[in-house]
Amino acid sequence: MNDDLERRYRRLLRAYPKQYRAAHGEELIGTLMEAARPGSRRPSLRETRHLLAGAFAVRVRAARAAGVPPWADGLHLGALVVALLTFARFPVLPYFTYEVWTVLGVVLMVALVRGWMWVAAPLALSAALWASRPMIAGGFFTPAPDIGPLFGDLAPVAPYWVIAAVSTTLAVRRGATMPARSLWWLLVPPAGWMLQLIQVPTWEPAWVVSRAGLEVVALLLVLAATIAARDGRWALAAAVHLFPGLVYLAEDLPHTSARGFLYWGVLTALVLASLAAARRAHARV
């Protein structure tokens, strides 16, 4: 029976990083086995919950970039998410449009993933200026090569200005580079482009509800990570991600339905809760 219980404990411990298991795994197993009730064959729900919560906390703390302040890491992650999602929705496929813009977008995303702020900042600023040309006063809007999209309202250009502002801030305040992030991030835009290629109707209610649910789950995880790690990097990243959406809401306010207000209200409440949790954690430190 004890062999069954130990095997199940070890299975739960796989949720922890390999390095953590190597350093503390046997000690944890010993403690758990000593505290187990006689005759137990499986961990209790309370033990399972605590072990999984502990694994989540350990992984979240291990994911923090070493030697980087929470504000810088959070801004970097937020700008990366905004860039990837913006270009994932860009109409590249099934008809390949704006070739130069797409290539520059790929270079920008790679630069953000690799932490090359000296590359990302000028590219993002150039993209923001180009996309905003119809709104820029002083006769700047003149005939030019069809390089990329042009917008006459704030919501579509807000993501580009967010990326430019964050990249420039990090380039000035933190130097030319930031710690690189996983290359797996770069799979996000191709996934969006593949949906375009197979012409999936992402505007259908089922897709819209699924995306909203995914965002809510992601922000709940941000709140949990903020509490577990006791710093504000994920809360700040979520706030950066939310900002372009709030610009869209403000611009489209007269046409927003009750469901739209509910959606944006829930997202805003979760981000504010994460920021409040980060502030409380900082105050305790």
Image: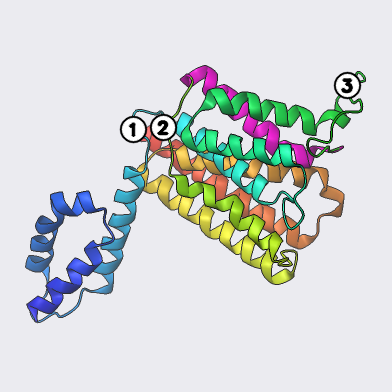
Query: Which residue is disc 2 drawn over?
Result: 179
Going from N to C along the chain, the mark reached first, 2 or 1, is 1
Per the rendering, the mark at residue 215 is none
Query: Which residue is disc 3 drawn over?
Result: 140
**Can you give x and y, in whole percent of width and height, for residue 98 in the image?**
77, 42
Relative side of 92 to 219, left or right: right
Number of marks in the image?
Answer: 3
**Can you give x and y, in whole percent of width and height, for residue 107 in the image?**
59, 35
Q: Are marks 2 and 1 in contact (CB under 8 Å)?
A: yes
Given residues 188 and 59, the one toward you in this image is: 188
Q: Residue at x 27, y 68 (%)?
A: 48
- Give the extent of the magenta segment: 152-175
Q: Amino acid at mark 1?
A: Ala
**Can you give x and y, in whole percent of width and height, for residue 13 in the image?**
22, 62
**Can you give x and y, in whole percent of width and height, for residue 120 in the image?**
58, 29
Q: From this view, report whether residue 125 is shown above or below residue 22.
A: above
Q: Amino acid at mark 2?
A: Pro
Q: Cα distance, mark 2 to mark 1? A: 8 Å
Q: Dot 1: what SS? A: loop
Q: Cα distance, mark 3 to mark 1? A: 43 Å
Q: Dot 3: what SS? A: loop
Q: Are marks 3 and 2 in contact (CB under 8 Å)?
A: no
Q: Dot 2: what SS? A: loop
Q: Residue at x 73, y 70 (%)?
A: 205
Q: Is residue 164 magenta?
A: yes
